[in-house]
Image: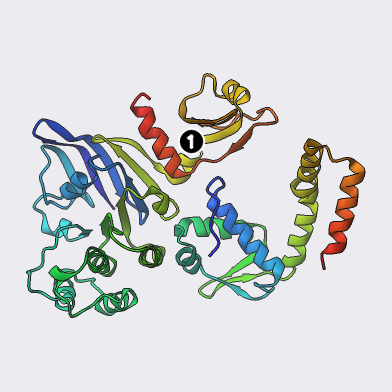
Amino acid sequence: MAGFDESRPIFLQLAEMLEDGIISGAFPEGGQIPSITEYSAALKINPATALKGINLLVDEGLVYKKRGVGMFVSEGAREALLAKRRESFYESQARPAAREAKALGITLGELKKMMERGYEDVD
Amino acid sequence: MSIELKNVTKTYGGVRALDSVSVKFGGGLVYGLLGANGAGKTTMLNIITNRIYADSGEVLIDGESAPGNDRALGKVYMMAEANLFPDSMRVEPALRLTAQFYPGFDMDYALDVARKFELPLKKKVKALSTGYSSIFRLTLALSCNTPYVIYDEPVLGLDAQHRDLFYRLLMEKCAEGEQTAILSTHLIQEAANLINHAVIIKKGRIIRDAPVEELSSAAHTVSGPAALVDAYIAGRKLLSVNAIGGLKTASVEGEPDAGAPAGLEISGIGLQDYFIGLMNEEEGK
């Protein structure tokens, strides 16, 4: 099972894991996600931490609780997550890449070329 | 509903093993009792479970004075190092004997745990290896279903695979939310994600008693070129500092500066690093 990075709160990392699962289709819309107990045992994290992580998605309406049954992925959750990640793409990916490029003395022209090449390489 | 110690002091031959300790355990949480060897962890646990007496102070279990009070003490199960079973007793009868003393003991669950660990049921308790002796005792602790369970160095002698299994079973148990667990350990890294609340003890005194989240936001790490790090840490309470060539990494108490200069990397601090820093800090290093 994936290890955690101890410099960031575990509940945030769990929430991201769950988001990744929804985006990849591992947790399809309308499907059930693992329970707090399952997450807690499988990842060896405190149940309160697991609850806190999952509640982040509940608060955003990406996951909902059915009393006595479990938790399910909301309809539209995947599209909502994609939109959220697109929105943060500049801050989380583009800007750091540009900063690193600058520090290395890579010109804007070279950077653009690399981005094009990367874009073509990925299926 | 809690185990509560009020101003508990215990002295051995002039050395204060516990120095006016006040602390509470309850609320269905998982506590980490963290300290170096000889810090007073086991002394505290032995006083809670009436194995030794405090020189002064009070121990209350759900509000009742604990010493000599069987009803109160019956709410606490301690996984201890000592085996209290007769030398000739085998594992399975020892499980059944324990079940007679603890009404909530779940024999089916105990046998299931034993099977998962491949604990030899027909072997004499006395003849178990260090690792299997730990497994035997943690099987009892997981199965007893008392309101409070104390695990004293539960993974002593266990290999990685069995430690992993124990942590899974412990989290499953704790997710039921009906039990308060105290995990006394010097393996802080392994306990860090399992516990809600840390009680850090040093030389018989409690130096931190707080939710883990609070402790990890009580400090942070900064790294970068030495000159920048030195400027950043000036006037801050330092937990630790490491320099490799011109690169410096320091852990300091408090929240990070919002306006830290570019070139400095600020990150969170793990419980273990915080603990090590605290130990050094209190030494005045």
Q: Is residue B132 above or below residue A86?
A: below
Q: Quadrant of the C terminus of chain A?
A: bottom right
**Horizontally, is B51 left or right of A53 in the view?**
left
Furthest residue in direction front, as rendered: B245
Mark 1, Cα crowd under 10 Å, few <14 / some 14-19 / many 20+, is: some
Q: Residue at x 11, y 51 (%)?
A: B51
Total numbered circles: 1
Residue B44 visible in the shown view: yes
Instruction: Say what amino acid the circle numbered 1 marks.
Output: Ala
Q: How is the protein colored in the picture? A: rainbow
Which residue is painted at 7% across and 69% down in the image?
B87
Residue at 27% over, 61% down: B147
Q: Give SS at disc 1.
A: loop
Which of the 4 quarters of the picture holds residue B208?
top left
Residue B225 appears at what percent x and percent y? 63, 28
The answer to whether B8 is drawn above or below residue B96 in the figure is above
Of residue B164 and residue A70, the one placed in the foreground of this image is B164
Residue B145 in percent (x, y) is at 27, 67
Q: Nearer the viewer, residue B30 or B147?
A: B30
Quarter holding residue B144: bottom left
Q: In the rendering, at what x and y percent does residue B66 appear?
A: 15, 50
In the shown orientation, is residue B202 left or right of residue B245?
A: left
**Residue B46 placement (x, y as % from top left):** 17, 49
What chain does mark 1 sit on?
B
Q: Is residue B12 left or right of residue B107?
A: left
Task: Inspect this view and state whether residue B64 appears.
Answer: no
Q: Is residue B53 left or right of residue B39?
A: left
Q: Circle 1 sits on which residue?
A: B218
